[in-house]
């Protein structure tokens, strides 16, 4: 079987953003969707609460935007926020048309005893309330919304004749090339590049594939698994962010990691206790004193934005020494609890907790990355032909702190926006190629013997007009150090290459980021983290056995893939910690004990792309982009 695959559109990720894009693209396009593991192993599948949209007659898009901007603590991109939330009703209606069995209102059920989920209207849906929302606006499917949504979309995608889903296929590197193919007219910095596919690792057959495509959609999810306690599945390690950065994309606001306030605090569980429990009246108590502590923290009590509730719980845990607080819903009718939260009720009951009578032990858990690859509301990145959607992307919707249940909406809206934009890009690209071919006449070739001709500049201008990179306002540029913290290794020691060594550092990295890059941070903690990460990177680099004899340095076996993944995680961890270290304020999900106040002007943090870099070496960055930052300078 050939190791080269050709397709019209390559989608990296089979979660809600990826499948929403795939199902909304024209059926005339051949679409290939990659899933790093089994299809159900994605964050979308585990989403409980629901999808936020202004569906109630008493609600409005204006109110939804206002609540989002408040939660985002001054860092939301207002235009993108208004555009994404303004498409909420259409997005939920589209999901209804895909067959998602949303929970209906009591009135709808009474009037229709034989509901057809395929023709549900948004006015039929039961709405719940979550933290930060001023009213009920969260449509849900019981308390397992993500599973129901993904089941419906997966069935649609699997039966679509133009969509091929490849489970257990992991993207390693995005492939880019000049948009104008004639190398003799390359103009270095002014050369416009476009994304044309990816190098992919086939886990089943343990081999590397090259997938060529006219456009690529990055929908690879977040980075929660860099932390010890995380709600995300084990595939969410931020590899999409790294691929985009290495290909030439800006990254924004990596320091804003949202912690869900109420993860189940039982052994090593990653199970979430939905915010909808607090929306329906759940209360938080200190197990030792029985005090309902949120009443003294915020006037919204348990329904304050997530960053506020998570910090309050963390403070309680620090003082009580138990490792958890109690979430109690036992004052609500048992029948109501069992009907509205069947999955949570049954899961807890199997663990010996009857939530109708017993309090639930909860603690914050790493949940969502508010930053990512810079995009606009149409999913366009800094690289032509490369789109991004979902948690991997930064549209500016979430700002410094995501408003509950806005993420599923963003996946659908931006995914469908990509699907509307992408065919136009392909048409423009085809016209450019046709024009370029016409220029290759005998007369044109003779004129083009000199490198900078009028014909070239005309083609170059057409290429520039095909794609508009996203624009950002009020930014601050974060500088990565020129040390080996951001380097990929050329060599790997046989002893270190063992599964045990890799597993030990992976576990230690999770513990390090949880302790030093958690809900609260300080310069001392962040410096310690940077030094430790650098030591791990140096221990890998000072070795003797070559990683791979392939020209790209990408892995071709499972053993090589394991070390490759670890090194990429260490590089991303450096970026995250450096971003937190260089933001000298507390805002939203980023809280600095040594800088507890808001800065006067809210600024979006930007990490410039790595230029002239390959997967084999992140150190090949142009020198004028690399400035060493002594750790002690900003204490």
Image: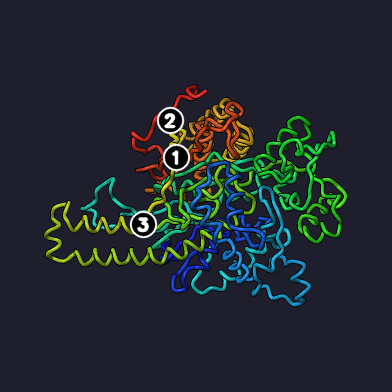
Does residue 548 appear in the picture of this structure? no
- Residue at x 60% of width, y 39% of height: 589
Which of discs 1 and 3 lies nearer the camera? The answer is 1
Cα distance between the residues tagged 2 and 1: 25 Å
Secondary-structure class at tag 3? loop
Whether residue 597 is situated above or below residue 276 in the rendered picture: above
Which label belongs to residue 475?
A: 1
* Crowd rating for badge 2 (residues with CA inside 10 Å; few <14, some 14–19, many 20+): few
* Residues under numbered marks 3 and 2 in contact, where contact means CB atoms less than 8 Å apart: no
Q: Looking at the image, is mark 3 or mark 2 earlier in the sequence?
A: 3
Secondary-structure class at tag 2? loop
Q: Quadrant of residue 380?
A: bottom left
Q: Looking at the image, is mark 2 or mark 1 earlier in the sequence?
A: 1
- Residue at x 52% of width, y 38% of height: 576
Cα distance between the residues tagged 1 and 3: 22 Å
- Residue 606: give x, y in percent of width and height: 45, 40
- Residue 164: give x, y in percent of width and height: 51, 68
Which residue is tagged 2? 483
Which residue is tagged 3? 467
- Residue 536: give x, y in percent of width and height: 53, 33
Q: In the image, 386: left or right of 94?
A: left
Query: Of 576 and 550, which appears nearest the observer?
Result: 576
């Amino acid at each position: 079987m050939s190791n080269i695959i050709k397709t019209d559109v390559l989608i990296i990720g089979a979660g809600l953003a990826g499948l929403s894009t795939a199902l909304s693209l024209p059926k005339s396009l051949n679409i290939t969707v990659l899933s790093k593991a089994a299809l159900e192993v994605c964050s979308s599948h585990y989403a409980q609460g629901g999808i936020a949209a202004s569906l109630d007659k008493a609600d409005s898009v204006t109110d939804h935007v206002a609540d989002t901007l408040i939660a985002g603590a001054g860092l939301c991109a207002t235009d993108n926020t208004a555009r994404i939330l303004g498409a909420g009703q259409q997005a939920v209606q589209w999901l209804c048309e895909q067959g998602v069995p949303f929970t209906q209102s009591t009135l709808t059920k009474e009037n229709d005893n034989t509901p057809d989920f395929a023709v549900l209207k948004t006015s039929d849906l039961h709405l719940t309330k979550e933290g930060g929302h001023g009213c009920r606006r969260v449509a849900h499917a019981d308390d397992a919304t993500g599973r129901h949504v993904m089941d419906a979309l997966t069935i649609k995608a699997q039966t679509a004749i133009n969509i091929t889903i490849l489970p257990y296929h992991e993207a390693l590197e995005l492939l880019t090339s000049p948009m104008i193919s004639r190398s003799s007219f390359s103009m270095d910095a002014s050369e416009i590049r476009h994304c044309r596919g990816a190098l992919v690792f086939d886990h089943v057959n343990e081999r590397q594939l090259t997938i060529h495509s006219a456009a690529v959609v990055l929908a690879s999810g977040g980075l929660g698994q860099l932390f010890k306690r995380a709600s995300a599945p084990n595939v969410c390690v931020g590899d999409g962010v790294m691929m985009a950065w290495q290909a030439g994309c800006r990254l924004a606001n990596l320091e804003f990691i949202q912690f869900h306030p109420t993860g189940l605090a039982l052994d090593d569980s990653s199970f979430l206790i939905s915010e909808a429990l607090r929306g329906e009246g759940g209360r938080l108590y200190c197990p030792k004193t029985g005090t309902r502590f949120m009443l003294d923290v915020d006037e919204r009590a348990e329904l304050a934005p997530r960053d506020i509730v998570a910090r309050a719980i963390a403070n309680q845990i620090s003082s009580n020494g138990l490792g958890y607080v109690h979430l109690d819903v036992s004052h609500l009718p048992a029948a109501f609890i069992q009907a509205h939260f069947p999955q949570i009720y049954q899961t807890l009951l199997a663990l010996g907790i009857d939530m109708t009578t017993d309090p639930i032990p909860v603690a914050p858990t790493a949940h969502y990355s508010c930053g990512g690859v810079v995009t606009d509301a149409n999913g366009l990145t800094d690289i032509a032909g490369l789109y991004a959607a979902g948690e991997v992307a930064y549209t500016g919707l979430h700002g410094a702190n995501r408003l509950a249940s806005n993420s599923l909406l963003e996946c659908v809206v931006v995914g469908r926006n990509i699907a509307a934009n992408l065919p136009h890009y392909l048409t423009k690209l085809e016209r450019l190629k046709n024009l370029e071919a016409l220029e290759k006449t005998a007369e044109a070739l003779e004129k083009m013997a000199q490198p900078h001709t009028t014909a070239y500049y005309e083609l170059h201008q057409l290429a520039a007009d095909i794609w508009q990179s996203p624009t950002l306002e009020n930014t601050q540029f974060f500088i990565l150090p020129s040390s080996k913290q951001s380097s990929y290794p050329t060599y790997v020691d046989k002893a270190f290459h063992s599964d045990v060594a890799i597993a030990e550092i992976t576990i230690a990295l999770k513990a390090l980021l949880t302790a030093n890059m958690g809900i609260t941070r300080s310069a001392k903690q962040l410096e310690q983290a940077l030094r430790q990460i650098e030591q791990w990177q140096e221990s890998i680099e000072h070795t003797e056995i070559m990683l791979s004899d392939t020209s790209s340095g990408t892995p071709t076996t499972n053993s090589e893939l394991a070390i490759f993944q670890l090194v990429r995680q260490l590089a991303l961890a450096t970026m995250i910690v450096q971003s937190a270290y260089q933001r000298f304020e507390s805002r939203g999900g980023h809280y600095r004990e040594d800088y507890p106040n808001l800065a006067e002007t809210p600024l979006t943090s930007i990490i410039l792309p790595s230029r002239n870099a390959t997967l084999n070496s992140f150190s090949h960055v142009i020198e004028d982009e690399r400035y060493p930052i002594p750790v002690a300078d900003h204490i």
